[in-house]
Amino acid sequence: MIDISISEVGKYENEKVCIKGWLYNQRSSGKIKFMIIRDGTGFLQGTLVKSEMEEKYFDMLDDLNYESSIIVEGEIKSEKRAPSGYEMLVKTIQVVHNAEKDYPISLKKHGVGFLMNYRHLWMRTQRQNAILRIRTEIVKIIHNFLNQKGFCLVESPILTPAACEGTTTLFETDYFGDKAYLTQSGQLYNEASAMAFGKVYCFGPTFRAEKSKTRRHLMEFWMVEPEAAYFDFQDNNKLQEEMIVAIAKHVLEHCPLELKILERDTSMLENIQAPFPYLSYDDAIKVIQKKGSDTQWGDDLSGEDETIISGQYKKPVFIHHFPTKCKAFYMKPDPERPETVLGADLIAPEGFGEIIGGGQRIDDYKLIKERIKEFNLPEDDYQWYIDLRKYGSVPHSGFGLGIERTVAWICNLPHIRETIPFPRMLNKIYP
Ligand code: 4AD
Ligand code: MG
């Protein structure tokens, strides 16, 4: 008998197979019983017919608790009504471990706060599983896409001596008597790597001590950050556009079952095609003020501002040319209009808000030194970064895409906390 995964049942119609997994659910109606077995790759209905199997196996199901680990053997049958199109006619059950009776998160409705305390078990459920599987597919396509485009993975450090995205959200740690910080972004190191390898990206966890409780913020989140030499603002936006189109297409092709479980309106994803619209920051301010926002020219956009703009589009939209004074120190001012920068945020549609921040970097030695001073950053810690403007400086650009926000948008989730296996939220670090 052959061992198979539930994800591949379609290849085994009318064959006898063995599946190793867990008992997700069960019900019986006399001479026929149903179980749902899950094995990590999917969920499959098993049917137990009294007249077609040994009685001891038929009876066994009644004594099994939720989430017991079991190995089942049986025949795969086509079943139009099942989500995967198949079910198993069960012949034998082997119990590996009969779980305790008091499974704390049985399949009835619970609040998210309660479930988050059982995240280690909650991730076994169909919906959570679908979200996290879409996440892994998104990560996979990003690597494939960037590799195909000639970008090479060069890691940035997690422990750093200095800030990248402002000093207010740093997680501080002791580094043998000195202060060190968990990285907020791999960008600055990426810039060094880009001068060594041309086109690079880093992909890792980043940390922000955001003292705000919003549906878009985590303390620890994953970011993919491409950076390239001889790459300008427009090249950078083009790459973002292509990457987002590739993500939507990949998820549509590879996760139809997961999207169905999440009841995602797939026409919204089919719509994600180039070209994406552009909205200048100046125009964005007009749009949000008309809707009652009191954000003024010169302020960064708030979460609510992003929601307003985001709700008006069916595709991601680039908001570009932010005021120099509201963006990070490394952003290159537009030579034509130096009070604004050659940077853009990509705002996801359907009210989801910013998923990417990026732009062209300052490549001028004098200017970068000035900006570091203006921002009160310790020049000594940035000496290596300044060096990049001394030895073979070139126009270069890059961006950072937040994985969790992207997953939230693709899956249409109201809150970012379900998009990462173990979310780190304000004042909450369990499990
Ligand atoms: O816009 P941000 O702060 O940009 C940077 O860090 C740049 N240094 C990236 C670069 O150019 N290499 O962050 C980039 C993205 C945001 O658009 C958002 O998707 C995500 O990271 N992000 C967060 N996601 C979850 N929780 C948070 N607290 C986040 N902060 C940023
Ligand atoms: Mg940003």
Image (tube, rainbow, N blue to C red):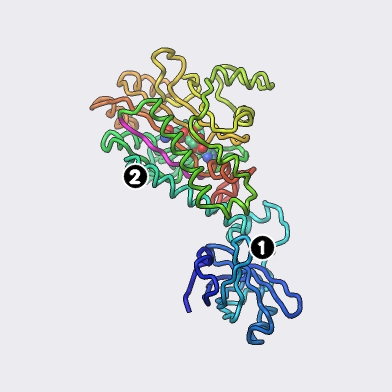
Q: Position of residue 195 (x, y in %)?
A: 28, 33
Give amino acid for label 2. Leu
| Prevailing secondary structure of the magenta residues | strand
Q: Where is residue 151 in the image (x, y as percent from the top left)?
A: 33, 40
Quadrant for the C terminus, please: bottom right
Q: In this view, does 44 lie above or below 268?
A: below
- Find the residue positioned furthest to the left: 391
Q: Is residue 76 above or below residue 119?
A: below
Q: Position of residue 352 (x, y in %)?
A: 60, 36
Q: Do the residues labelled 2 and 1 touch (CB within 8 Å)?
A: no
Number of the label disc, if any, that sits on residue 81: 1
Q: What residue would you read off at disc 2?
A: 153
In-image side of 180 versus 111 (left or right):
left
Range drawn in magenta: 220-229
Give amino acid for label 1. Arg
Real-space CA distance between mark 2 and mark 1, rounded to the nearest whole angstrom? 44 Å
- Find the residue positioned furthest to the bottom: 55
The kind of secondary structure element at disc 2 is strand
